[in-house]
């Protein structure tokens, strides 16, 4: 018993101090209008939550976060599943492809976004390519909607390798007899994918979607480096708004409110959507 | 037919890989271009080799110092994770005590907590402890890690208990059993934990941004972000700096990717 306490104590103390206590403290902070510096934290009850209801920046960040979250989830499932399906066969050079897909995952967000910022710059190589084939030169990072599209593509690109490996792991647990039976019944590759692989991979799809939603909800590094939340708030996800509110404008209490309410709304909606979706399929 | 299918599969994979790798090709190509060629093709294959861009970029900001800070922080975090996670995993896999499963499930639940629900009070603690602008602030709060505990615990559970019992009969105490008998057998799990911790620490941005303000303690990712806004008109220097910041993680990954993938598989299986 004593040994167990001694072994667990270091990890539990750090996790308790820097994860569990802050999780509760954020809730309490959301009821104050603390500025992050002064010794006292004036209690204001639910004022911050009332303020939130009429806050255009918060509403904007919710819309941006939902669009970003849905975009990244859908594209992550499609690309991860597609790449895994292509690699889930005895194929030459499999390890090389997997390494290529994984490179963005291990690259720091700051480095990756620095590169993308130039690739999609007004006179960058993407536009050079587009105008060479007569498709014009859109101002990718200067338009709120196009900037969000860029951020979404960057995030999907960065996570592709991870999702591919997750799906590959799950695919390897499906017994080959299932596929043999389907082949005997004359199912083609697309039918097999739609009727067998995809339904059997549902738990992994759930995991990939939750991962994508958590990543987009707390997305910060990519946003900071690619657009700093702009233009005109077009890429200001909840995480970035919390940072700006607390650390740039010095409203720690209100920042905590945004974090709590934003989390509750995003995951509440996800849960409702999941329940409705699940019922419709059943 | 089958050969044709194989060929088309390769064609799609090759196209996808090129698309994924293209930004890296552009990064390297640009870092080696002269100033007058940065906005002209070819974009993806180096055709000029202005190696001077690298020393030029590295002398424009205290990159050497940022690098040392990143190395110190990363080493501290990796070592801390290995020690703390191993001890906790050992208790959770091998020792009997009331509430063991509750503790484990509680720990796993903390993995789902998004950063922004904890970062404000965590920052406040750093200030109150007087850790702002220090290696302590960069390392200690980041030792909160559950991933490694899950991976190492899983591995320990797969080792037969007879190993422990035999060593105990030979007179070893619990710590000797862990250090001399179990850990040497756990190398794959320790390697996975170390790789993940390395990538987490080396690439981390938000936490170092919040708890440091002095160049004395800023890491390479912070340096790169500051450099990006200052040197925006000089992509060739900027990309030289980016290559330097990204390379360690890529090298670690290429050498240790089997550990990384195995670690992912270990967490994937529990789903």
Image (tube, coloured by chain):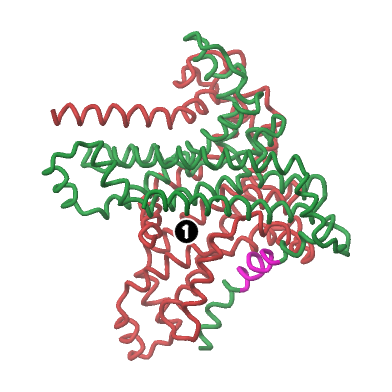
Chain colours: A green, B red
Please say whether residue A218 is one of the residues in the magenta stretch: no
Viewer-nearest residue: A212 or B265: A212
Pick the front one: B104 or B174:
B104
Element at label 1: helix
Horizontal side of residue A104 vs B12, given as left or right: right
The structure residue drawn at horizontal position 63% and vertical position 65%, both measured from the top left corner, is: A19
Position above or below: B39 against B18: above
Compared across the picture, whether B268 is left or right of A231 comes to left
Q: Residue at x 76, y 58 (%)?
A: B132
The residue to which callout 1 is attached is: B194
| Image side of residue B21 versus residue A145, left or right | left
Left or right placement of residue B77 versus residue A50 in this view: left
Q: Which span is picked out in magenta? A: A13-24
Return the x and y of residue A61 as percentages of the image width and height. Answer: 67, 41
**In which quadrant of the rendered view does residue A46 lie?**
bottom right
The secondary structure making up most of the magenta span is: helix
The C terminus of chain B lies in quadrant:
bottom left
Task: Say which quadrant the N terminus of chain B sits in.
Answer: top left
Which residue is at 65% across, 40% downward? B63
- Compared with A37, B59 (above or below) is above
């Amino acid at each position: 018993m004593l040994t167990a306490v001694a072994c667990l104590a270091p990890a539990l103390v750090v996790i308790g101090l820097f994860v569990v206590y802050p999780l509760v403290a954020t809730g309490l902070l959301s009821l104050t209008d603390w500025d992050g510096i002064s010794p006292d934290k004036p209690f204001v009850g639910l004022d911050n939550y009332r303020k939130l209801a009429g806050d255009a920046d918060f509403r904007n960040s919710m819309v941006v976060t939902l669009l970003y979250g849905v975009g990244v989830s859908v594209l992550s499932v499609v690309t991860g599943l597609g790449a895994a399906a292509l690699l889930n066969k005895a194929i030459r050079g499999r390890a090389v492809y997997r390494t290529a897909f994984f490179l963005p995952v291990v690259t720091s967000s700051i480095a990756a976004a620095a590169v993308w910022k130039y690739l999609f710059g007004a006179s960058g190589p993407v536009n050079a390519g587009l105008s060479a084939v007569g498709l014009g030169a859109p101002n990718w990072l200067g338009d709120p909607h196009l900037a969000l599209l860029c951020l979404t593509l960057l995030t999907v690109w960065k996570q592709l390798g991870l999702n591919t490996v997750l799906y590959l792991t799950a695919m390897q647990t499906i017994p080959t007899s299932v596929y043999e039976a389907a082949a005997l019944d004359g199912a083609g590759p697309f039918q097999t994918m739609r009727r067998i692989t995809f339904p059997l991979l549902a738990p992994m799809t759930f995991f990939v979607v939750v991962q994508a939603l958590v990543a987009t909800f707390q997305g910060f590094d990519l946003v900071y480096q690619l657009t700093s939340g702009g233009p005109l708030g077009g890429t200001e996800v909840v995480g970035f708004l919390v940072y700006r509110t607390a650390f740039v404008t010095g409203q720690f209490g209100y920042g905590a409110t945004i974090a709590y309410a934003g989390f509750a709304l995003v995951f509440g909606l996800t849960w409702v959507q999941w329940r409705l979706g699940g019922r419709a399929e059943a | 037919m089958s050969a044709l299918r194989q060929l088309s599969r390769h064609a799609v994979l090759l196209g996808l890989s090129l698309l994924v790798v293209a930004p890296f090709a552009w990064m390297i190509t640009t870092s080696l271009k002269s100033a007058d060629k940065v906005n002209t093709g070819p974009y993806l294959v180096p055709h000029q080799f202005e190696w001077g861009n690298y020393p030029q970029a590295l002398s424009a900001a205290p990159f050497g110092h940022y690098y040392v800070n990143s190395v110190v922080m990363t080493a501290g975090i990796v070592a801390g994770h290995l020690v703390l996670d191993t001890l906790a995993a050992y208790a959770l896999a091998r020792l009997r005590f009331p509430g063991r499963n509750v503790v484990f499930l509680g720990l796993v639940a903390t993995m789902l907590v998004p950063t922004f629900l904890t970062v404000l009070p965590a920052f406040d603690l750093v200030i109150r402890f007087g850790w702002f602008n220090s290696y302590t602030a960069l390392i200690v709060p980041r030792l909160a890690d559950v991933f490694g505990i899950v991976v190492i615990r899983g591995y320990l559970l797969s080792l037969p208990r007879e190993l422990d019992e035999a060593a105990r009969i030979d007179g070893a105490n619990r710590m000797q059993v862990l250090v001399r008998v179990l850990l040497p057998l756990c190398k794959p799990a320790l390697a996975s934990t170390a790789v993940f911790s390395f990538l987490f620490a080396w690439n981390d941005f938000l936490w170092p941004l919040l708890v440091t303000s002095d160049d004395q303690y800023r890491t390479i990712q912070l340096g790169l972000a500051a450099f990006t806004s200052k040197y925006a008109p000089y992509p060739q220097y900027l990309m030289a700096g980016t290559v330097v910041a990204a390379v360690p993680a890529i090298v670690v990954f290429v050498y240790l990717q089997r550990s990384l993938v195995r670690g992912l598989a270990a967490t994937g299986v529990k789903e």
